Amino acid sequence: MNDGRKPIAVTDDAVFALTGKGEQQLRGGHTTLDKTALELLVGIDGAVTVAQLRKRFPGIPGYAVDRTLATLIEDGYLGPAAEVNDDLGLVDFFSKDPIKPPGFAPSAAVDREASDGVTSLQQQGYYVRIARPAAGAAKPAEGAKPTVLIIEDEELMAKFLRRFLLLDGIESRIAGNRAEILAELRRQPLPDLLLLDVMLPDADGFDVLHKIRQHPLLKKLPVIMLTAKATREAVLKGLALGADGYVTKPFEAEVVSRAVRNVLGLDAA
Amino acid sequence: MTDDDAEYEEILNGFRREFRSQCAQRIEALDARWAAACQPDCTRETLYEFQRALHSLVGTGRTLGYADVSTTARAAEDLVEPYCDQSGEQGGAQCVLPADVRDEMNRLLEAVRLSLTAICE
């Protein structure tokens, strides 16, 4: 709530930024917000005005943007950019990665880009851990272990996920290319959830998600994007296509199993 | 440290060892894809395969605790990504990288190799 302060106006030139609570929604692995609210949180970076934000989301009616922003402010997920900046330093939704490996000597051009805050370098530190309960998805049977289909072409990463999910009582199957994905989706019983990478050898994870959401029998299958595609545009694309979660690599194994449980509506183990 | 933490660490260390043991192969594969990407008949698919090799290092490196691998690979991936866009009209068409981009990539790839060599077993 707004603690009795004067209500914050959602005017065309107003600029808002994530508060710590807002960051928690995107990076905490458990999101309770609806799709529109999530998209706006991802899209806000403390720099765009409300008018620019409306243009960024042509699919969301202007009144819905305003109403959702007002609710996000009222609930403490967003605040005026200057205020948030002063208090928490969270205005810039991206963060730069200061780590430089031995022997890595950026050219003057790269140095200049870094100091100017060029997007491609800012994107290095961008991460989200979005996971919200899937609407209408069937829960695993009582006492049964949930089963996840890991769609991941990097063998070591797939094994890593499988091993750590099992530690948390989650079974998994693996598919690394288009043929394996099709074979797994034809196999009964269907998995309870997909963990979906984007860059596959002969398929694009976003296309896979799009096709799943259009398929009459698969459309309610919960999907979490798990990918190193970590630009704001990629996250928005995943959410817009109907992903129930978006976790960027690199990640901690515990984050993934928590996201799976959240999306499936299961209690933490 | 609890038993669960110890088990987690032990398993994680196993994956780290496996990753380190693959470093030489990964450098070799990356170099082969880069060599293909430098050919005059390079297509967007060839570049995509090169990008995918870098992308894989970005995701796996830091997840297993090797931040330098991810950072260097990310810089290289960012450079090549605009040329790999499959959605454009020329998707699948021949796509030769400009000379200055190739030079910059050679420099960035050296950093990727160094980061992998530093942890190689």
Image (cartoon, coloured by chain):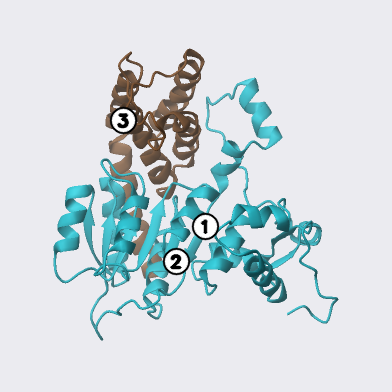
Q: Quadrant of residue B88?
A: top left
Which numbered disc flags the more N-terminal residue, 3 or 2?
2
Q: Drawn colour of chain A?
A: cyan
Q: Are marks 3 and 2 on the same chain?
A: yes
Q: Badge 2 is on which residue? A: B1
Q: Amino acid at mark 1?
A: Val
Q: Residue at x 43, y 41 (%)?
A: B58
Q: Nearer the viewer, mark 2 or mark 1?
A: 1
- Residue B119 to residue A31: above or below: above
Secondary structure of the residue carrying numbered label 1: loop
> Could you classify mark 3 by the number of other residues whose Cα lies within 10 Å: few (under 14), some (14-19), or many (20 or more)?
many
Q: Choose between B97 and B50: the one closer to the eye.
A: B97
The residue carrying pointer 1 sits among few (fewer than 14), some (14 to 19) or many (20 or more) residues within 10 Å by Cα, namely: many
Q: Is residue B10 visible?
A: no
Mark 3 secondary-structure assignment: helix
Residue type, numbered disc 3: Glu
Q: CA distance from mark 3 to mark 1?
A: 29 Å
Residue A94 vs residue A15, the one in the foreground = A15
Q: What residue sits right under mark 1 in the picture?
A: A128
Residue located 28% across and 28% down the image: B29
